Amino acid sequence: MSSLISVKEILDKTAVTASAPCRIDAGGTWDIKAMALSFERYRPVTFNVAINLRTTVTLLPYKSGRVRITSEGFSEGVECKNKNMDLTAPFSIFFAAVNYFGFTGLEIRISSASPVKSALGGSSTALTALIKALVKLDMLAGAKRALSRRDILTLGYHLEDGISGGNCGMQDQAAAVYGGVNGWYWSYSSVKSPVTREALLDRAGMKLLSDRIMVAYSGKWHVSLTTNRIWLDNFLNGKTRDGWLHANDVIKGLISAVRTMEWQEAARCIREEMRIRRKITPDALIPETGHLIKEAEHFGCGARFTGAGAGGSVWAIGAPDDVKRLKKRWEKSLSQIKGACILPCKVDPNGVK
């Protein structure tokens, strides 16, 4: 049996930090293996944009033989002894990452610029940042090789998918690892890589996109696991499959429009995907988010829920003047909801660091 590595003395000398961006998206759920693998011939794809609401992980010294995790937005931290670490408890995916590296004697502090459970990929983003921090710590402890970005993506996905019992996607980790604006093509049958990345914009293009998007938090928490299970069941039993395949084609059009910076066409594609989503995933919308999306469409923008919806956040894309007018309308609507707000952000060209 391999022995644990106490990192308390290393962290006594220097704290270790890492951060990663969260994301907004379209075409989500196609990144889940249960959907993507059996329909790989249709080239399933997800579009997402990393935004500069970053999650930061800090590693600090703690009692030998123990690991402690605290996170903003959660009232209490959780502490475990390494030898009887509970990988079903709160923060289980983070404890699993620590266990993978075999470390003991550390505290993990997680802070995020995005609201808790806002459907912006928060838990996967935090896991990505944690793995990057643990890689840095591993190098300080004498490891001869750091993990590549591809390694971090794969490890994070498998940890989260395995601990949660399956049916996790990979797009949240992908945006967190690489940053920028990307189309992700899912190919889980490939031994080399389950995903192919298409980077759509350079930094100048990202700046143009930043002027054309806006993100709002609805003030309502979201939990994706139950929602995703319903969507998967309806896809697998054939009830909504045609709609999902149609939506996949629309997202391919969105990717083409963003690549060529045809912003009006990009907004049209988002409106079209939402039209389909209202039919195949009606539970993704709650009154608050549905109202925000309708307001965006009234101003000529495209808008959709982030992640699995059912609360969380909404993002919009449109001409800069239309987005400015929409901002005033959204601010008025959000002012009536406790905790709701516009989330000032831009495209983040940088991934985990």
Image (spheres, rainbow, N blue to C red):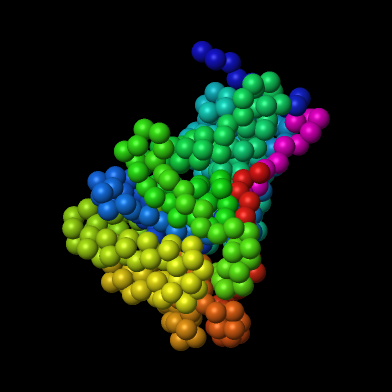
Q: Residue at x 31, y 49 (%)?
A: 36
The vertical placement of 50 against 56, above or below, is below
Residue 316 at x, y percent in the picture = 51, 73
Please identify the quarter of the rendering in which residue 27 is found.
bottom left
Which of 209 and 333 lies nearest the eye of the viewer? 209
- Can residue 215 be seen? yes
Q: Nearer the viewer, residue 196 or 80?
A: 196
Quarter where residue 207 is shown:
bottom right
The spot of residue 277 in percent (x, y) is 33, 69
Give the number of marks: 0
Q: Position of residue 2 (x, y in %)?
A: 55, 15
* Horizontal relation, residue 165 to residue 327: left or right: left
Residue lying farthest to the front in this orientation: 260
Q: Residue at x 75, y 26 (%)?
A: 10
Residue found at x 24% / y 57%:
235
Q: Nearer the viewer, residue 28 or 208?
A: 208
Give the extent of the magenta segment. Answer: 11-20
Q: Residue furthest right?
A: 13
